[in-house]
Image: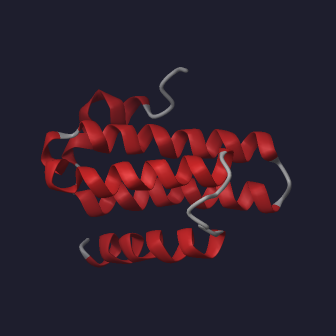
Amino acid sequence: MSIQHKDLAAGRWQELPLLEQMAHIGGEVERAIQWKEKKNADYSSKACERALELLDFALDSPKNRSHLKEIARIREVLVDDFWGANQFASSDASWRRYFMEFAYAARRGR
């Protein structure tokens, strides 16, 4: 799989605070949900893959060490929801609620 967020992979991701990183991840999750609602599984899957790529960047970031458990759990639950049996019973509404808090906080911090 090729890198979709080339500018972020080149180092820009490391410059972003965790709140902004999570807001970016939430944006991709929101796109995945919207495409799923429009019954476009291919685009939904691609958006989810981009969210996973950003989650992997967050996991690799040394400054996020104290948040590794939460970031890894988000990744696990996202994969389970979009491609698994949804054993964690996540929903589109729960994803939106979770990531909206980061988007709001990132906007307030600007």
Q: Residue furthest top?
A: 2
The residue under the point 68% across, 52% down is 85
Q: Is residue 56 left or right of residue 46?
A: left
Q: Residue furthest right?
A: 39
Q: Is residue 16 left or right of residue 38?
A: left
The image quadrant where one finds the N terminus is top right
The image quarter in which residue 5 lies: top left
The residue under the point 45% across, 37% down is 53
The image quarter in which residue 23 lies: bottom left
Q: Is residue 38 left or right of residue 58?
A: right
User: Who is closer to the viewer here, 73 or 24?
Assistant: 73
Q: Is residue 78 above or below residue 62?
A: below
Residue 36 is situated, as x and y percent measured from the top left of the image, at 76, 56
The residue under the point 41% across, 43% down is 54
User: Who is closer to the viewer here, 87 or 43?
Assistant: 87
Residue 89 is situated, as x and y percent measured from the top left of the image, at 61, 67
Q: Is residue 4 above or below residue 17?
A: above
The image quarter in which residue 24 lies: bottom left
